[in-house]
Structures are given as C-alpha cells and as structure tokens.
Amino acid sequence: MKKKSKFDGISFSPTEVELWTPELDVSARGFRCQLGEFVTYWKQGSIAREVAAYLCRCWIIHHHEVLVGYITLFTDKLIVQ
C-alpha cells in the first residue's frame, strides 16, 4: 500500500516560491523526499552553510511554516578579474 503524504490533496500551484535565508524559521520536521540525500542536506545544515558562504541560493515552498520542497542553485566556478 502506498504511503499517504501529509500534503495529499493540497495544490501548491498558487503558492509563492520564496528565497530562503537562514533567518527564515521553517521547520523540516517530517520532510521527506524520494531521494534521501536531499533530506540529509537540509537537516544536517549543508544548505544553510552553503547559503551563508555565498556558494548557493535556495528557494523554498512551505505550508504553515513546514518545508514542502526546495531547490538550490550552486555556483560552478568563480572568475576574478
């Protein structure tokens, strides 16, 4: 039997995607993903450290202050002129 998601029946289409900063208070309690490493990156603070070091940007979708999903954009090279 397929597990039921706590977000079953909720449409996130009208939800604003928000730029995440470490100051935003968003709980990741119960956050699950088909690829477990994405949960680990978030919960162990990898994303927060990389955002603070200006190595990536992160955008989130949350519902009642609970993380639903995120996407990151990482730098791939730095050119100094």
Image: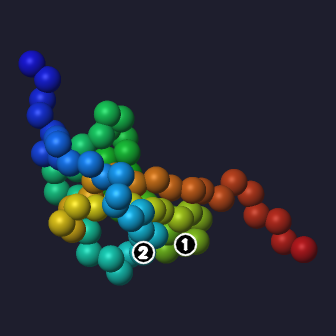
Q: Is residue 26 left or right of residue 19?
A: left
Q: How crowded is the residue under tag 1: few (<14 C-alpha within 10 Å), some, or many (20+)? A: few
- What residue is disc 1 on? 53
The secondary structure type at the circle numbered 1 is loop
Q: Is residue 74 left or right of residue 21?
A: right
In the rendered image, residue 62, in percent from the top left (x then y), is placed at 28, 61
35 is higher (above) or lower (below) than 32 = above
Identified at 53% across, 65% down, the residue is 57
- Direction front: furthest residue: 14
The amino acid marked with disc number 2 is Thr
39 is higher (above) or lower (below) than 2 = below
Render colour scheme: rainbow
Q: Is residue 22 left or right of residue 6?
A: right
Depth check: give the residue in front, 7 or 75: 7
The amino acid marked with disc number 1 is Ala
Quick one: quadrant of the N terminus? Answer: top left
